[in-house]
Amino acid sequence: MSFAWPWVLPSLLVVPVLLAVYIVMSRRRRRRTIAYSNVALIRAARPARSGWRRHVPFALVLTALACLGLASARPQLKADVPVSASTLILALDVSGSMCSTDVEPNRLSAAQSAVRDFVKAEDSQTRIGLVVFSGFAQLAVEPTTDRDDLIKAIDSLTTGRGTTIGAAILKSVDAISQIDPDVAPAGDSAASGSAASPGPGGSAGQGQPRAPGSYAPEIVVLLTDGANTRGVTPVDAAKVAAARGVRVYPIGFGTTNPTAMVCTPEQLGGSGFEGFRGGGQGGGGPRAGNFLVADEPTLRQVATITGGMYFPASGADQLNHVLSGLPQQVRVQKRIVELSVALAGLAVLLVLLSVVAAARWTAFPA
């Protein structure tokens, strides 16, 4: 436990001082006795009650004062507290490499199945939005509680060329900003490739960066099987998200040995089967030149910058496991919990109890 205002703690010394005064006064009252010839008569006239009861009201008041003194010092604890994920943005990679058959029947089909199950299992009050990205990022479904619209969009995904992970993060931030006034939009960062931080002034929604460790309730779950090939870099986009308190939870999907790429006609937009061997230029990163394998170092960096967590998933079973356990990961945070209100409430309760005790055992002895 720590205290925000430790200099208030010396005020607690008033408690032992008052206790000492009370003890001295009690002893003086005992000395002021009157001699009676018939002690038995006095005992018969005295109310039948325990001697300790008359001290209870004062003890309760002292305890209440101690609680108020502690509350004034603003005691704080760091604890795991639940955080409502009121909105969740799914950012899904639909680049051509998602047709790789190293995950049966191919990466995209396995991802569609896992995400579909995840959406159905989520709490009905949680709004879910869908961002898809390949050569560019777009908001396919605005955050909604309508699961039917989401399932239809997931089932109708089609592939494209290129992988714009950074743009997908920025597009997800923009989607969150539309429903949360405390989250500023990414602005021109997506177009310029810059990682401009929010400007000064106003609330967080008007551009003021959040305090370190302070997060928006909305999160981004980003699933990709490759590396960024164009546009703003994922790290720069992560800095924009972090400045707005938006956590990103990247999932690196697929094996490190991609095989032949075969998409269904639906995944190719109805043009028939096609063998595709990808590649591309630009973007870069630690794995530049191999855009068919998840860029784990960059994805881990994105998670670290934004306060999220990175999850590898080489197969369908692992992806299902990651998605099923995700709510427990994102809905609990380490936060500083202040105990002042609880202690103040306890002090009020103790004072009320002291009044009741005084009325019961002093004014109207049993």
Image (cartoon, rainbow, N blue to C red):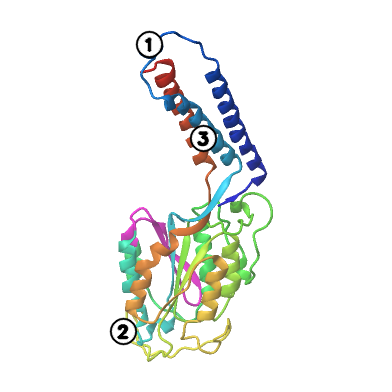
Q: For the residues marked 1 and 3, what is the alpha-carbon distance in whole angstroms?
A: 33 Å
Residue linked to disc 3: 63
Q: Secondary structure at mark 2?
A: loop
Residue linked to disc 1: 45
Number of numbered callouts drawn: 3
Which residues, given as a range, are shown in magenta?
123-149
Quadrant where the C terminus sits is top left
Q: Secondary structure at mark 3?
A: helix
Residue 167 visible, this angle: no
x 43%, y 91%: residue: 277
Front position among marks 2 and 3? 3
Residue 33 appears left or right of 7? left
Question: Label 3 near label 2: C-beta < 8 Å?
Answer: no
Residue linked to disc 2: 104
- The correct choice, above or below, for 253 with respect to 1 in the image is below
Front position among marks 1 and 3? 1
- Whether residue 32 is in magenta: the answer is no
x 65%, y 40%: residue: 10
275 or 366: nearer the eye?
A: 366
